[in-house]
Amino acid sequence: MTRYEIAVIVGSLRKDSFNRKMAGAIARLAPPDFAFQQVQIGDLPLYNQDDDAGPADSVKRLKREIAASRGLLFVTAEYNRSIPGVLKNAIDHASRPYGQSAWAGKPAGVIGVSVGATGTSMAQQHLRNILAYLDVPTLGQPEIYLQAKDGLFDEAGGIGAASKKFLQNWVDRYVDWVKKHAA
Ligand SMILES: Cc1cc2nc3c(=O)[nH]c(=O)nc-3n(C[C@H](O)[C@H](O)[C@H](O)COP(=O)(O)O)c2cc1C
């Protein structure tokens, strides 16, 4: 069986992050040939181009994990109508040195949860712009904007009944997208 290792990048460091929980719940909706692994971004230094020649171990680890993956899943919070700085920092790290980006060509899905009614729509739009530049083929439809409300998750940490069909459809489309574009 061909396996699809997916690197999951969560755009929040918060211990009880809705987005981290959503990343776990989404993984449960995927078929058994998909394996999701959250990559750590909280221990990365702030990106400094001077360090390109001698990157920190955490940066090497990030690049190795992205390079080894066959697809990407971004599950991000929205901070001040954009992506959180920690996510941008991770994206910048793995995009460098120039010409040695780990992101290029990896098929991706973008999703997010926020407490605001617009459900990370602005953050996702900014992220799509970055990913387009990085040559990351990103699933366009369906878009998914989630507001953190009671019932979004069930007791076991899965997707709540009201949103399950909607999210299953998204995951099915994401799986097809990765299979179509993965190297
Ligand atoms: C610095 C900061 C900026 C925020 N800006 C937004 C925003 O622009 N839109 C929004 O819907 N929520 C915003 N929020 C609220 C987040 O949706 C909320 O903190 C959410 O829980 C973050 O996701 P997480 O649970 O995965 O950490 C902001 C929160 C912080 C801390």
Image (cartoon, rainbow, N blue to C red):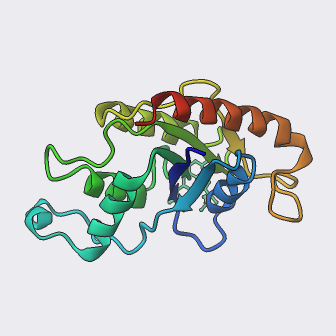
Judge whether 177 appears above or below 161 on screen: above
Judge whether 165 appears above or below 113 on screen: above
Q: Residue at x 74, y 53 (%)?
A: 28
Q: Quadrant of the N terminus?
A: top right
37 sits left or right of 24 in the view: left
Extreme front residue here?
Answer: 1
Q: Residue at x 64, y 47 (%)?
A: 33
94 sits left or right of 9 in the view: left
100 sits left or right of 124 in the view: left
Judge whether 30 appears above or below 15 on screen: above
Task: Give the x, y percent position of residue 113.
Answer: 65, 49
Question: As rendered, which of 81 and 71 lies closer to the eye?
Answer: 71
Q: Residue at x 54, y 38 (%)?
A: 109
Judge whether 85 appears above or below 1 on screen: below
Question: As rendered, which of 160 and 120 lies closer to the eye?
Answer: 160
Residue 117 seen in render: no
Extreme top residue here?
Answer: 141
Task: Give the x, y percent position of residue 56.
Answer: 22, 74
Task: Give the x, y percent position of residue 135.
Answer: 32, 32
Task: Give the x, y percent position of residue 17.
Answer: 63, 65
Q: Quadrant of residue 42?
A: bottom left
Residue 182 seen in render: yes
Q: Total of numbered circles in the picture?
A: 0
Q: Residue at x 64, y 55 (%)?
A: 23
Q: Quadrant of the C terminus?
A: top left
Question: As rendered, which of 71 and 121 lies closer to the eye?
Answer: 71
